[in-house]
Image: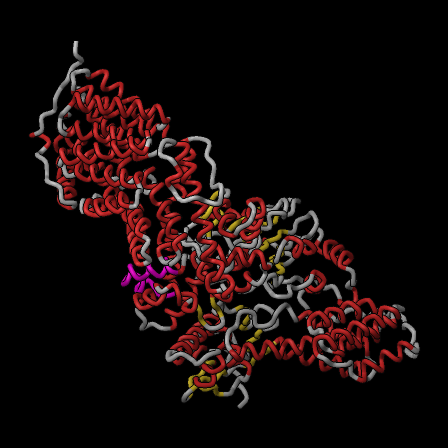
Amino acid sequence: MAPQQCSGLDGAGPAVLRIRMLGPVEVWLGNRQLDLAAPQLLAVLAMLAAEPGRTHSTTQLAARLWSARPPKSAGSVLRNHVLALRRQFDTHGYPGAGIAWLDSTRGGYRLGLSVEFDVVAVEDLVAAAEADRRVGAVAAADVKLTAARQLWRGDPLIGLPGPWAEAERARLDRLRLAMSEVAVSVALDLGRYSTAIAESEALIAVDPHCERWYELLMIALHRGGRRVEALRVYRTARRLLADELGLEPGPELVRLHQQILSAESTDAEPAYEPPAIPKNLDLPRVPAQLPPDIADFVGRAELVAELAALLDADCDSRPVVAITGLGGVGKTTLAVHLAHCVRDHFPDGVLYLDLGGMDEHPRSGEMLLAIALRAFGIEPGALPADLAERTALWRNTVAGKRVLLVLDNARDVVHLTPLLPGPGRAAVLVTSRSSLAELFGARLVPLDVLTPAESWRLLERMASPRRVSDEPDAAREILRACGHLPVSLRIVGARLASRPNWRLAAVAERLADERGRLAELAVGNTSVEHVFRDSYRQLGPELARVFVLVAFSDAPDLSTAAIAALIDRERAETEWLCEALVDLGMWQTPERGRYRYHDLLRLFARGAADEARQREWPPALRRLLDFYLASAKNIVELRDSGVGTEYYAATEQAGQRFGDERECAEWAMTERSGIVALYRQAAAFPDARTRTLAVDLALSLAVGGDAGEHLPQVAEALEVMSQAAEHDGDRRTMARAQLAAAVARLVGMGDLSAGHVLREAGAMLRAAGDRPGAMLAEQMLGTAMAYQEKVDMAVAHFRRAIELGRQDGNQWSEGMGWATLSRAYCDARRWPEAAEAAGKALFLARAVGSLRLESMALHELGFATMQCGESEKGLELCRRALSVARRDGRRHQEGWALARLAEVTLCSGDPAAAVPIAAEAVQALTEVSATVRRLRALRVYSRALTAAGRGDEAEPILRKLAQSRRHIGLSVPGRPADIAVPTMRTAG
């Protein structure tokens, strides 16, 4: 059935739908462009328009639209697309045009409009050109080919999904090759041998196994007086066909070779200048090649405004904006949207080129320049074959023009350099997954993922605000699983939009499983995994090894030194590899010398690991743990030199070196979360060496007090390692793991039940002759008893710890025993004994050079001294303790010193001064999750507030204190108002 003649835009003349498929798809109704940004929607219209007047069943449309089995919702999705098309017809045609022009019939849809395709025009022009050439009308053929090529704006059907679009793309690729073959033949007939040579070489690059292209190239070279090169082409073709296909050249190519050898072909014919292109072909005067704008573009408003102003600056300096970032972060979306915002300010045209940088064979500079020059009306015959000459022609063509060049998907700076215009009024907008750091003078824009608020708005736009607001928790889980990456959010949003009955909670649940998350992030022909694989394919073997191997680590980020240990490479080489991965958009660098993955890229990297890489991970984990343990031992030697690093497992690496206590503290804070993640991974490994390294690392950091808020996770991982060691009969490692876990639970969680584990571990360590371990167990048992206010038992354990330290010749351990014994004596109000014990601790601290131990001894000595009647001296000692703690750099040590200083200040009769000191102590101890110490600081804080006449502020603190003490099994003390606050004066 022929399409009906429908009323036009004014209701009188016939309406014609013009579809441009040879490049970014555009749809025009009359002189109005339809706003059809959704690829699936464009594909539906293209399928209907390909056979106007014919009824297409929903079954046929679904089979052509979805590459796999169509979803159950295919019918409803197609209905939604038809409704959207009708709305566009109503908007750009007349009210009611949608139903009149797009008819629903039983089981399908029919487009009742006359349609004009650029594809049909090109097919007709190529066929006519070939017919003209056959009858000798070469000039007329050349004019028609030029017109056909100007209609071809880029890769056809960009972004359209489904089998139909894929088949059409393949058909149109064949059409382009056929057009090029005719063009080469016409160029030969006209004596334009340079043009024929360049185009033949381009055809060979596209299809190196086609003998016809070699024939054309050999003819062009021979006629152009380059006989030797023509013969060399034959040898190249013969070798390639034999090596790759096991074939000999066909008879036509062999015959041509013999003709050239015997010089039977005619000499070069004179070049022929074609006439000007007739005006009635109505070729475009300026390029307008932008893909459609993104209808649901959200966020980045400030960046768009800033870059638009930069591109629109009316000056003689050529502005270049380079948007870079990982695949799927929205570079092209931003560039296209930005170009649409400023396109009206570029009267000489807007050129869009997809450089194909992520393709296996990116488009060459010659090919891209040919496309660009043709867009500005340069005839194919006028294109130089040489890249340098073609670049010069390009820059001369755009010189002085107010044009915007959008160069999408550049592989690197070398790839895009030939397309950069010279100084002038042109503006350039580039996108690339590479960093393009060498693009000097450009405004580099490393694009990050969307903010949570922007991600939320994008999901609302795609899935509907109501669905998102109805399930806000599930929506947040979806955003987290997508990593706020635009491509993943758009995929999820598209799936939700096409499945209106799906609950967000069901989608969130499917995305929660990391093993299948990437498989879920796919719709139609678009997938996150495909986006990432394009980038991964660009990596060389060593970069690919690093990218995959480091991904096995659960650490959120790693330093250069840690990665060097993991991959077993020198630090300088490692830094180069890491920076290369950043430059290629595969890694991020939150700060100098640290590297991390986007969460979805980490999942992709793990999925890309073959068996060889998987076998590399266990020794890599051991090397990484060895590096961290060596670094921790370096900290112990610097900060607590008396502890003795020989107690820990021997390490093969030097580890990180530190200049002072502050560097130690910063390193421990930075690496903390990564080390905790490695504990959990080490717990899953069966080999004893991995367990030993992890347990000793935990012990060294626990002794140093550097585990912070992660102590519960540390304890869980250590308990798993303890069980594994017990299973293997390794009782010493089992006991050491139990000891480290108990320290974590007692200090970090206030878990008083850890005392039972400490007793068992201590007994096993004494039996194994591990005196330092047994000493630490006694020390922590004393601490547990002190927490429970069982002072006599605490004193007994601390005295045993002192004795074990003395027997071992470890002055640091002995000094720590005296410092904690002093605190126990203070709790028992045995002030002279407390002062004596603190004095011994201070002596040993200075003997071994431990700032941490010195701070503890000073603040306990200060408290005991004040209680003995020397208030001013006690205050001065506690102030010195705080100063030393801050030099030491450990936040928990600072918190302890602050709490004692607040208590002494309060007891000296100045509650107003004590309040801010106590508040700071609570803050510090909260930051490091020192549960019981924090409760003591809270008690001092509430007492200071009450004594300062601020009882209303003390009430909520007191309630919180009581609740927390009950939670960990401690008795609740009396109300602050009931506690006597002694006022001591300096003995005089």
Check the image and report above or below for 720 versus 672.
below
| Secondary structure mostly seen in the magenta stretch | helix
Q: How many marks?
A: 0
Residue 167: x and y in percent read 57, 79
Q: Does the magenta stretch include residue 471?
A: yes
Q: In this view, does 715 lie above or below 193?
A: above
Horizontally, residue 308 falls left or right of residue 491, namely right
- Residue 108 visible in this rendered orientation of the protein: yes
Give x and y (percent) for residue 676: 36, 49
Image coordinates for residue 700, horizontal then vertical, percent: 36, 41
Query: 166 or 880: nearer the eye?
Result: 880
Q: Which region is colored magenta?
A: 462-481
| Horizontal and vertical percent position of residue 623 | 47, 50
Q: Which of the 4 image quarters holds residue 545? A: bottom right
Q: Is residue 42 above or below residue 386?
A: below
Q: Is residue 365 left or right of residue 329?
A: right
Find residue 466 and report its image quarter: bottom left
Q: Foreground: 939 or 262?
A: 939
Q: Which of 490 and 76 is in front in this view?
A: 490
**Residue placed at 49% from the left, 51% from the top?**
566
Q: Is residue 272 magenta?
A: no
Q: How is this picture coloured? A: secondary structure
Q: Is residue 218 left or right of residue 912?
A: right
967 with respect to 736 (left or right) = left
Q: Is residue 341 visible?
A: no
